Image (tube, rainbow, N blue to C red):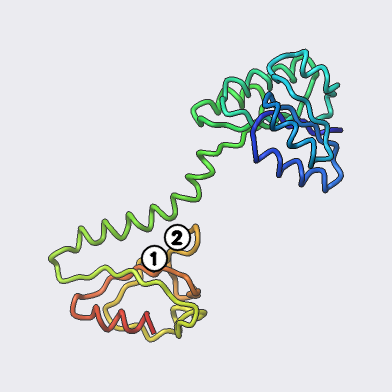
Amino acid sequence: MKIVIIGGERVPYFLAKRLIAQGYDVYFVNRDKELCEEYSKTLNATIVNGDATSKKVLDQLEIEPSDIVVLLMERDRKNFFVARLVQEYYGVKNVVTLLNNSENLDLFERFGIRTLGVTDLIMRNLEPLLFGSQLTQELEEKTALKGVSVIEVSLSWDSNIARKKLKELNIPEDVVIVGIKREDGFIIPRGETTLQPGDEVILVCPEEKRMEVLSFFSS
């Protein structure tokens, strides 16, 4: 079995390096002549300079049904065309392709083509961060002029309350912890929730207790 990587620039290089290090037979196809020459100097792989949408170019690879084909071209139309080409002419079952537009997902899935949705991947990492920011903004809007403060506090590495469970803390009265932003996630707090350095804690408290709360969570 060999792994055929088609298209792309830097991503296929590092992907090929990892696959080669694991003992896989890697073929790289790209229409960029200079890129192919660069890769041929540093990669222990079979490098083919050519347009993968041409069957004549693909024939050089001697593709077999058990091979894995990875498509990293920047246009879904080309990735789909080549995916169908290797499925129909060479009987390849395992085809993985970069998906640039998530609206094309159904088309790829209909033909059993696995996809790597870059936009969806980025959004999955962004959404928790966006949610936390939107929550703070909405709370501030709804509590404005009502004697309530919405506070967001980031816990330092030497914080006295970090690495402790919420139920263990003597949190000032009338203070509500709404949520905790941690790395790429958002946590709904419970008594068993343990605060960690780097956490961004979203709190709601009476305006007159603002300084007391800031002092407590910044200690």
Binning the other alpha carbons within 10 Å of mark 2 as few (below 14), some (14 to 19) or many (20 upward) gives some
As drawn, the label of residue 179 is 1
Secondary structure type for disc 2: strand
Where is residue 149 shown, x and y percent of the image? Answer: 23, 70
* Residue pictured at 64% horizontal, 18% vertical: 81
Q: Mark 2 highlights which residue?
A: 186
Counting residues from the N terminus, which is met first, the one under dot 1 or under dot 2?
Answer: 1
Where does residue 69 sit, x and y in percent of width and height?
74, 29
Q: What residue type is labelled 1?
A: Gly
72 to the left or right of 182 = right
Left or right: 42 with respect to 155?
Answer: right
Task: Indicate the secondary structure of the residue bearing disc 1.
Answer: strand
Q: Which of 77 and 74 is in front in this view?
A: 74
Q: Residue at x 43, y 63 (%)?
A: 181
Circles 1 and 2, Cβ within 8 Å, touching? The answer is yes
Q: How crowded is mark 1: few (under 14 residues within 10 Å), some or many (20 or more)?
A: some
Q: In this view, does 121 lie to the left or right of 42?
A: left
The quadrant holding residue 96 is top right
The quarter of the displayed image where residue 56 is located: top right
* Quadrant location, the C terminus: bottom left
| Residue at 61%, 36% in the rendered image | 116
Q: Is residue 198 left or right of residue 110?
A: left
Residue at x-position 62% and y-position 28%: 73
